[in-house]
Amino acid sequence: MRVPEHLAIIMDGNGRWAEQRQLPRILGHHHGVEAAKAMVEECRRLGIRFLTLYAFSSENWGRPADEVRSLMELLNRFLAQELDSLLAQNIRLRVIGDIRQLPSGVRSTLEATMARTAHNSDMVLTLALSYGSRDEILRAVRRLAEAVGQGLLQPNQIDEDHLTQVLDTAGMPEPDLLIRTSGEMRISNFLLWQLAYTELYFTEVLWPDFGPAQLRQALREFGRRQRRFGLTARQVQPDN
């Protein structure tokens, strides 16, 4: 089975999963965390080198305050509990997004976990936290503008590589496959620049129910696709 080098996932449907069972929404997020742990382990087992999970968007700050508070507590607990597992599995943790908005305790735990796992090399697990792609691009453009203002760069020198190098994802390959759960058919301000030629896979399955079997189904579909990057099918796979 062909696997992507970089898999990105929009983990959607925790709240609806709970509501369908007449449970508090936060219990859906608890089950979503367990699904995320299982997905990390399965992706590492399959040899996926980069896994990026959309965990908390910049727009999610607008949710009810008690839900946001519970999500931050859940995130902090996840980071503290999973450090040993990340170290044992040789997984490096990265984060993209404006983490300055995170509570100081969560930010401290996150920074400590990233530091402890910085030299791990089997897989890179990236959490998108307080992340919005438009905000990421704006921050990157400001960095380039500062470089121009300091005389370090000329405007006519700016190309795609320059912008890519100042995005939060600098140093990572672009995603080969994006999976979104819960039946929503949009990318919700996630990796807008990086997804230019990414294969998209949407499923009705809610995130807490998305496990290894559902992942393998998505990967089988990915394996049937021909990625052409703007070329013709014959250019990508010429006749023998």
Image: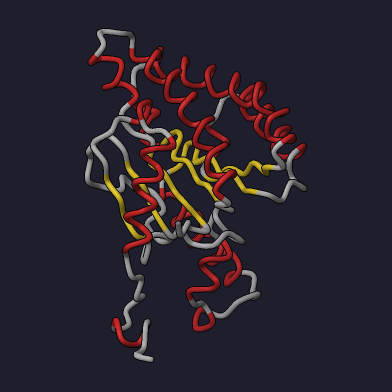
Observer-nearest of 25 and 104: 25
Q: Quadrant of the N terminus?
A: bottom left
Residue depicted at x 58% and y 65%: 165
Of all residues, the one furthest to the front in this rendering is 240
Residue 43: x percent and y percent?
53, 44
Asked if 39 appears above or below 136 in the picture, the reply is: above
Decide if residue 134 is in sight here. no
Q: Which quadrant would residue 180 be assigned to in this image? A: top left
Residue depicted at x 44% and y 40%: 54
Residue depicted at x 34% and y 24%: 14
Residue 130: x percent and y percent?
47, 36
Decide if residue 197 is in sight here. yes
Asked if 107 appears above or below 192 in the picture, the reply is: above
Residue 102: x percent and y percent?
55, 29
Question: Is 7 on the left-hand or right-hand side of 202?
Answer: right
Q: Quadrant of the C terminus?
A: bottom left
Q: Which quadrant would residue 226 be assigned to in this image? A: bottom left
Of all residues, the one furthest to the bottom in this rendering is 240
Observer-nearest of 52 and 146: 52
Asked if 136 appears above or below 23 in the picture, the reply is: below
Residue 207: x percent and y percent?
36, 31
Observer-nearest of 155 and 111: 111
Observer-nearest of 67 and 1: 1
